Amino acid sequence: MKALSSIAVLELKLGRRNRWMLLSTCALALFALVLGFVGASPTGSVRVDPLTVAVANLATLSVYLVPLMALLLAFDAIAGEVERGTIQLVLASPVSRTTLIAGKFVGHLMVLSTAILIGYGVAGVAIFAFAGGSVDGLIAILRLMVTCIGLGAAFLALGYVASTLSRQSGTAAAFVVAIWLVAVVLYDLALFGALVADADGVFAKTIFPWLLIANPADAFRLFNMSMLETGAETSIGSVAAALPFPAWTGIVSLFVWTIGAFALSTLFLRRLEP
């Protein structure tokens, strides 16, 4: 545990030193404030909590932004050590390979969590103070921040898979960009294309819901939109309402992806010969 915490603290310090934490926090806060205040402007006539509307917009933003930040944090974790030649020193120490990657995971998750909590927290307080809100809206944004951390953890672990498979940072970067494109963009396009082709068939009724929840990005979005009052009015909210399983299945999907990808990256690291 001492070795794990030392590695985690080192990664946290590196995140602060290279301004990654500051830049991520500012980016999340800026996007959240813009989406929050712009989205809250028409809510007076329909009497919808501005903070709840902001959370709905932020849930969509987070699907794209949080996985990208997590992957960019993780891609250099092992590949960078191999490329710089420092992996020999690390693996020659008494620290096990599992402890090494677990320490990096904890440190990177702390960096990402700090950015999410501060960035979205500042935006939530500002929207609540100037545009109005309710207790339900505050609960919704807290739930969003916690699930964003879960989403980030899943993609951090996926980033480690790419990093342990590569011996160069450039190759690992290409892998994580491919992961982001497939998971966040292309996967949904393929699913909805198949759904249009078989709108009333076996795929739409049986296979489609499970393929949707199997994607960590979609699982995150389905859970958050299904928990919002305004979520049912959106296309993803109507899909969530029609799923044959409860909303909390999305959280289970994030957990399974995190554990599975972490185990896979640990296996690849054990096979790595520096």
Image (spheres, rainbow, N blue to C red):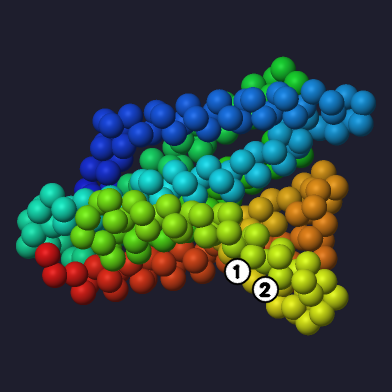
The amino acid type, in three-letter code, at marker 1 is Ala
Residue 197's label in the rendered image is none
Q: Is residue 185 above or below residue 134?
A: below
**Point 44% across, 71% down: residue:** 260
Residue lying at the far top in this picture: please name it.
130
In terms of secondary structure, where does tag 1 sit?
helix
**Point 25% across, 51% down: residue:** 169
* Percent position of residue 174, x then y: 36, 54
In terms of secondary structure, where does tag 2 sit?
helix
**Quadrant of the rendering where the C terminus is positioned:** bottom left
Q: Is residue 59 left or right of residue 75?
A: right
In the image, 226 versus 168, the foreground residue is: 168
* Percent position of residue 27, x then y: 49, 30
Q: Is residue 109 left or right of residue 181?
A: left
Residue 214's label in the rendered image is 1
Q: Is residue 1 left or right of residue 112?
A: left
**Point 92% across, 31% down: residue:** 46
Residue at numbered disc 2: 210
Residue 265 visible within the image: yes
The amino acid type, in three-letter code, at marker 2 is Trp
